[in-house]
Amino acid sequence: MTYNLFIYLIITIVAITAVMARKMLISAIMLAVASIALSLLMFKFSAPWAALFELSVCAGLITVLFISAVSLVKKEDMALKESRAKFTILPLISGAVFIFMAIFLMPYFESLSGFTRNPEIQPKVGEIIWKFRSADLLGQITILAAAVFVVKSVFYKRSEQ
Amino acid sequence: MTTELLSYSIIPLLAALAIPFFGRRSFKLTEILSNVTLLAGLGNLMFIIFNPSNKLHNYETFSFDGFTILMLFTIYLVALSIVFFSTFFKVGDFNKNAFYPLIMISVSAMSSMVLSVDFFSLYIFMEALAVTSFALIACEEKKSGIEAAIKYLLLTFPASALILIGLAIMLFANGSLYFDISMQNASPAVFSALAFIVLGFAIKAGLFPFHFWTPDAYQGAPATVSAYLAGIVTKVSGMYAIIKICTLLKVMGPASFKISSPLMLIGVATLIFGSIAALAQKDFKRMLAFSSISQMGYIVAGAATLNPIGILGAILHLFNHATFKTSLFLNSAAIEKSAGTTNMKKLSGLEKNMPVTSWTSVIAIFSTAGLPPLSGFWSKLLIILALWVAAPKPYAILALIFSIVTLAYFMLLQKNVFFGKPKEELKEVKEASVYMLIPVIVMCLIIVVSGIFFPFVFEFFEKTL
Amino acid sequence: MTLTSTFSLDWLFAALIIFIGAYCMVLTRNLIKQLIGLEIISKGVMIAIISSGAMSGNTNLAQAIIITVILVEAVIVATGLALLVKGYRLNENIDVKKLDNLRG
């Protein structure tokens, strides 16, 4: 319980910092820290495979993508002037929202948890992925193929140039 | 997944992966390969549907779900007409070796979505479809395309988040994610989950309070892509799931009205808003986009009655919408190519130079407005009947009135674009080439034939749904 | 420590994190920051999924789902960043307010 609470606080603080940060690079790094904390949480929930993916894809790949995009648009990033006030009040607002949610949403979540239905069979992860959720594998292949052609079509160099 | 029909989603995927290797030699091969794949799939489906032994054995040997087969047929039909049209359209500069594979992947994703038997595969194929649509919208090197794609991505992301939250609730409240919810296990938590999922798909379908992205996406996309998006992509990614959930709600007992009655209200609000907004538009494509929103309202209102007639009407209207909206968007693409603009202020009197385009538009418009004996009339009739029987009476009356408003704004469009005196600078406009007219003419034939032979269509669905 | 109380705590924080991400997506004008908000929302959603998996003793299914969701998320972010970089090359800015060419 305390461990979970600690990790949640880390993720929340890091997320607020990512939103408030003036530099995009810091936001991207904060996002990676949030991913690492989330993967620790997944280990705690005894979900090692999901934690592994979170660590490698979210904390690794996505951070690299963000940092490369930030470095590509750096000049404009500085020039974009927007008011800081809406970000500086974020900790206050999220505190207020948290109290509001604790009062009004907590009973709703408690009532939801009363309707739990445990499944009859609980197969292993590999069995689930290959046997019961084989449609997802087709979905993953489809979305990866889509990603390849997205990059191909978005970064198309015209023949004249 | 429904395994008997899995080849309809795997073959386009394989074709998409094969196209770049063939396309390195020449673009011609790319085009031929994509056309042939889709044509073969369509022929196969037509053999399944129109096989005379079905009727002979009173549909007892027909082992498929009529809704799934109809959706597969619609997907292949619209995709084939778009691919065939863009083979001869040749406007804009984009990577053909990425454009055709993206269309094939989206066909594959849509087919998988239609064949999926649980909520999570519905979600993942919807995301795959969305990713291909972003790229299709932005495939030309134009500012408007990129802008539309970014708006589409950011404004429909809340839909994904809502669907995932719904899935998370479903995961513990139902124990599995299959479509096997029945009256016994329909707890309030399951209803909360379904409410989140329906809300997400309503954003994806562009229903009334969440419609901001639709007109921009259709207007910013290249001409053929907007026909593809409006004709089938946004309909499958949003509306298919809503109809599917309505068929689930139907068996979940009386408590399901908590979801269905707000949904019906959203549907009626959408059809009113879409019609009124369409009246005010100055751009051909934007007016079609708002008309598309309004027709989505009819479909949702029909499905949310949870009445067999209403659901059948919604399914048929989804099919009819695909036929008439694709032909209207393809006509707007032909006009954009010939006259160079889709602004209705700058267009007039095109009927003389583009007679076929004009008259196919008239057929599609009459079908949209629901004039007998065209196919749109029957589906609208079923929806309004179901609303009259299973909903508050004002809803049915509003649906009837706004079907007349549909006719009004489309007659305005027809008058501005095709009738009247041609302007000086439009005197030289030429009719689109014969090949570009073929898909539109086929669509119009389908509208007329399925309207006239409606009793057979009805019998097919009565037996197989 | 009962399971039920952890569940409510999980979902409370998931809701808070989703709120922070949504706040960022709605209020910022910077496209990269909007994508960061999108990522934060995904983190919250993943907390919700893993917690409901643990709740019903079905962690393995939740794991299988999360693996796919992570993949989808990576593809979506990659697409968003690709579009952003291309838009930056054409428009020379990453300001959401400037995305207003499409009007009826």
Image (spheres, coloured by chain):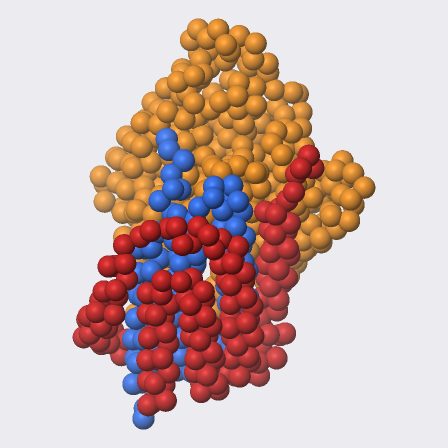
Image coordinates for residue B59, horizontal then vertical, percent:
59, 48
| Closer to us: A60 or B232 | A60
In which quadrant of the rendered image does the C terminus of chain C lie? top left
Q: Residue at x 60, y 32 (%)?
A: B92
Chain C representation colour: blue
Q: In the rendered image, which quarter is residue A131 located in?
A: bottom right
Image coordinates for residue A148, horizontal then vertical, percent:
64, 55
Q: Is residue B153 left or right of residue B333?
A: left
Q: In the rendered image, which quarter is residue A5 located in?
A: bottom left
| Closer to us: B378 or C102 | C102
In which quadrant of the rendered image does the N terminus of chain C lie? bottom left
The chain drawn in red is A
The chain drawn in orange is B
Q: Residue at x 57, y 9 (%)?
A: B428
Q: Residue at x 53, y 24 (%)?
A: B336
Can you name the residue that lies furthest to the bottom here? Answer: C1
Q: Residue at x 62, y 60 (%)?
A: A144
Q: In the rendered view, would you say A77 is above or below B435? A: below
